[in-house]
């Protein structure tokens, strides 16, 4: 059963990767190109200033061309990323199915996808939003990565704790009240973490605000495409497979009684 779900999740992840790649290619890459053009202008201005002072810097060779980055590189990275998340999603679904109230497989998958989108992407991104390639200092990339993953781990742990709390409270206070209390507990934990963790703002003052906003909206949309596809398509396929299994079981029982 778990093996079947895992394979299904990875196949759905491939589909999600194709859709996410298409979204990123159409809406994301133009924003990246504009950000790179802005960075190039800044580099040329700095080079002109250094040349006026008698300082010269050799250009570093480009290891991977921009066309490869925006084409094959983007496609490979996105599809592998989504396939891996599809497999993880299937494993979490296998553990959660039947334990989240009296929900159908489709509803369970949709709830898991929504919770994953919020816990894994949305909450960390509110504290440390995505930035274009020209934003951020190379010396702080390790610190920024560590802080982002710290916020993500806190968010995931708080989400798991909220689900467990909701299941405990549902027996005494009902599903609706238990859900509200658990959601409030989750919000308290993540708000506290966002206040305690340090902020990082390395956006240059002259960076176009519209470009920064558009880039972050596209980043949000990219994740939304992936999680929506995982939740809806995986849930639909799983519920369809369960219905076929129930139909086969009824047919076998009917045949056994007739014989």
Image: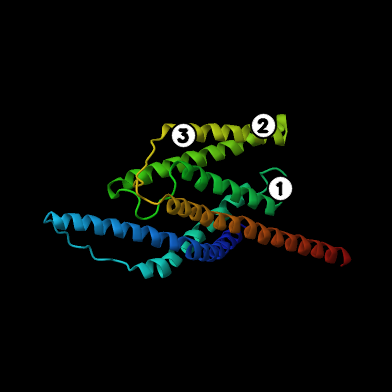
Marks 1/3 in contact by CB < 8 Å: the verdict is no
Which residue is at the far left? 54
CA separation, marks 3 and 2? Answer: 24 Å
* Residue under pointer 1: 103
Say whether disc 3 or disc 2 marks the residue closer to the N-terminus: 2
Residue with the most extreme front position: 52
Q: Are marks 3 and 2 in contact (CB under 8 Å)?
A: no
Characterize the local packing of mark 1: few (<14), some (14-19) or many (20 or more) Cα atoms within 10 angstroms: few
| Residue in front for this viewpoint, 182 or 192 | 192
Query: Closer to the N terminus: mark 1 or mark 2?
Result: 1
The vertical placement of 80 against 208, above or below, is below
Please, what secondary structure does the residue beneath circle 3 have? helix
Residue at 63 percent across and 60 percent down: it is: 233
- For label 2, the SS is helix
Q: Which residue is mark 2?
A: 169
Residue contact between numbered discs 1 and 2, judged by CB atoms under 8 Å: no
Tag 2: Cα neighbours inside 10 Å, few (<14), some, or many (≥20)?
A: some
Q: CA distance from mark 1 to mark 3?
A: 31 Å
Quarter where residue 188 is shown:
top right
Residue corresponding to mark 3: 193
The quadrant of the picture occupied by the N terminus is: bottom right
Q: Earlier in the sequence, mark 1 or mark 3?
A: 1
């Amino acid at each position: 059963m778990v093996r079947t779900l895992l394979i299904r999740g990875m196949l759905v992840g491939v589909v999600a990767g194709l859709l996410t790649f298409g979204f990123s290619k159409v809406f994301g890459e133009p924003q990246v190109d504009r950000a790179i053009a802005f960075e190039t202008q800044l580099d040329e201005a700095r080079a002109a200033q250094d040349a006026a002072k008698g300082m010269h810097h050799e250009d570093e060779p480009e290891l991977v061309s921009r066309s490869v980055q925006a084409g094959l590189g983007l496609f490979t990275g996105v599809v592998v990323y989504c396939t891996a998340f599809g497999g993880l999603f299937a494993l979490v679904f296998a553990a959660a199915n039947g334990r989240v109230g009296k929900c159908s497989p489709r509803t369970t998958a949709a709830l898991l996808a929504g919770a994953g989108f919020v816990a894994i992407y949305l909450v960390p991104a509110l504290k440390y939003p995505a930035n274009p390639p020209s934003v951020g200092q190379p010396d702080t990339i390790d610190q920024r990565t560590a802080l982002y993953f710290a916020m993500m781990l806190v968010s995931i742990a708080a989400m798991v704790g909220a689900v467990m709390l909701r299941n405990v409270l549902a027996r005494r206070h009902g599903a609706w009240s238990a859900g509200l209390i658990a959601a409030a507990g989750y919000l308290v934990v993540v708000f506290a973490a966002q206040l305690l963790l340090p902020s990082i703002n390395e956006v240059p003052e002259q960076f176009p605000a519209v470009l920064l906003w558009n880039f972050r909206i596209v980043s949000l949309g990219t994740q939304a495409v992936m999680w929506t596809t995982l939740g809806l398509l995986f849930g639909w396929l799983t519920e369809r497979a369960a219905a076929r299994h129930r139909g086969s079981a009824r047919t076998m029982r009917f045949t056994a009684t007739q014989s």
